[in-house]
Amino acid sequence: MRLTKTMRWTALAACTALAISACTTGSGKKSSDGANASGKKGGSISIQSGEPQHGLIPQNTAESEGAQVLAQVFAGLVEYDRKTNEPGLRVAESIETPDSKVWTIKLKDGYTFHNGEKVTAQSFVDAWNWGANQDNAAEGLPFFSKIEGSEELSPGKDKKPTTDKLKGLKVIDDKTFTVTLSAPFSQFKVMLGYTAFYPLPKAFFQDKKSFEESPIGNGPFQMDGKWEHNQQIKIKRYENFPEANGKAKLDSVTFKIYDKLETAYNDLRANNIQITNKLPISAMGTVKGEFGDRYIYKPESGVGFIGFPIATNPTAYGKPEIRKAISMAIDRDAITKTIFSGTRVPADDFISPIIPGYRKGAMGDAAKYDPAKAKALWETAGGVPNNTIELGYNADGGHKEWMEAVGNQLKKNLGVEVTFKPFEKFGKILDALGDKQFAGAFRMAWQMDYPSMENYLRPIFSKVAIENGSNYGGYVNEQFESLLDQADQAKSVEEGQKLYQQADDILIKELPYIPVYTYMTSAAYTKTVKNVVVDAQNRIDLANVELA
C-alpha cells in the first residue's frame, strides 16, 4: 500500500504460509459495550488524518489515509494480530484448502452492514467481481489476478471484459463460498485481510457515487454523515457490531484532515486532537520528553523510495547505471540521523526488515554511500539530459526536508543540477504519475498490505501493476515476472522464499526504485485517551481506544 505520509509499527515474523492453520484465530480484541471498569463510558475524540486520494470504496483504496478510515468502517475475513502480525480469522469462521488452489471460506454469524443488510458469501463475491473488472479501474484489481477467470475480467489495454464474474468464485450458501485460483498460492489466506477483499452491500451497486462519500460497511464504526473534503470525516460506534469481535468503546471519532503535520502536532499539544500517527520532523527532538510513555516509537513495515519514471522518461532514467549512481550518491545514514532524528533506518533491501525473507545488506554496494564511485559510474553512463534531475514529492507529508537533502547530495556528489516539484497532496502526485504527466524522479513509499515478501514485489514492480497497481515507473522485466509466478506456486515456504529473493535480486541489480530508508512509527497521544495501539500498517486500533 502506498504511503501518504509517514508510517507504521513493528510486527514479529508472520506465520509462514505452510503454518497458517497454526496461526491465532482470534483478533486479541476485547468485547465491550462502550465502557469497562477502568475507562470512561463512550466519549468522542479527534485524530490527525490526510485527505484520501479516491472515494471511499475498499477495492479502489490503495493509500494509507483512505485505508485508515475503511479499517474502522469495515471488517475483513482476516485481520492481523496487533503484536505478532499473524493472520487470524475475523468475519471468516474458517478458511481451508487441500491444495492451496481451491479454498473454502465459511463466515461467522452476526455480522451485518450498517444499513441492516446481512453480510453473506454473496457480499464478498459481488465485491471481488467488481474489483476484478478492469472497466471499473479499481486500484485493487491486481489482488484478484490469482483467481481463476481473472484474465476474462481484465484482458488488458484496448480489450473488453467478456464477463462480469470471476469463474473461480462460487457461492455455496449464505455462509460459504469457494475460491479457485488459477494456480496454487500458499499465501492466499494471508492476503485476505487487505482492504480490497472487504465485502460490499447491495446499496453500493445501486448508488456508487453516494457510497464513495459515505460508505456502508460492516465494521465497528459507521459513517456519521458524509466525508467533508479537506476538512474531516466523522464516524460513530455501530451498535449492532458483534460484542465478541471488538465492539467500539468510543461513541465517535473525527478524522481531522490536515495539510501540514506541524499544524496537527500543535493541535495535539493543545488537546484539540487526541492522537496522531504522523509527526513532523520538527518535533522529533522533543516529542519523547514532552509525551513520555505516550510517544510510540517502534519499527514498522514501510520502505521509503526514490522512484524513476522509466517508461515515461527513458532518456534520463532508462539506464540501471544512472539509477545506481544516484543510489550510491545518497548518504542514507546522514538523512536518517540528521533529518529524521533516528526515526528512520537506512534501507538495504526492497523488503522490510520485519518481513520473513528480508536479507540484511542485500543491496550491497548499491546502498553504500560512495561519492567517488557514484560520480565515476555517472560519467561513464553519460548522465542525464541537460544535466538536471527533477525531484517530485507531496508537500503535505513532511517530505520537503529530506528530499532537499537528497537533492543537495546529488548536486555535490554528481555535479548535477536539481530542481524540485512539490505537489500539494499525495493524491496529486499519484495522479500525475499515473497519467504520465510528471517525468521526474519521485518520492514514494510502501507499507505492507499483508505480511509477505510477495507484497513488496508484485504490487509495485509487476506488469499488471502498471495499469492497475502502484508500478508508477512502468518497470517491466520478464525474468522478474517468471520468478514471481514460480514463487507463488512453490511447494514449500522455504522454496518460495528463495524464489522471491531471486526476484528481489533482479530489482537490486536494476534499481527501478532506490530504497532509501525503512520506517519507524512515530505516534503520540494526549493524557485524555488510553489503550492506543498502532499496527504494522500504521493504523490506529480505534475500536479499543478509551477515554482515560
Image (cartoon, grey):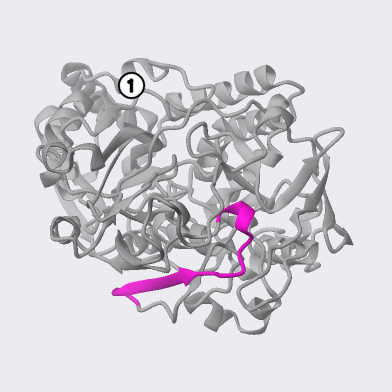
Quadrant in which residue 65 is drawn: bottom left
Decide whether residue 109 is among the magenta residues: no
Residue 367, position as x, y percentages in the image: 31, 22
Depth order, front residue of 485/98: 98
Residue 464, position as x, y percentages in the image: 60, 49
Q: With 524 as the anchor, is 153 left or right in this view?
A: right
Q: Is residue 2 above or below residue 98?
A: below
Q: Which residue is depicted at the point 58% across and 31% down?
A: 480
Residue 518, position as x, y percentages in the image: 34, 32
- Residue span colored magenta: 229-246
- Inspect the image, locate mark 1, and give the three-letter code of the amino acid beneath it: Ala
Depth order, front residue of 179/437: 179
Q: Which residue is depicted at the point 54% across and 38% down?
A: 81
Q: Is residue 168 visible?
A: no
Residue occupied by mark 1: 366
Q: Is residue 262 above or below residue 104?
A: below
Q: With 355 as the anchor, is 404 left or right in this view?
A: left
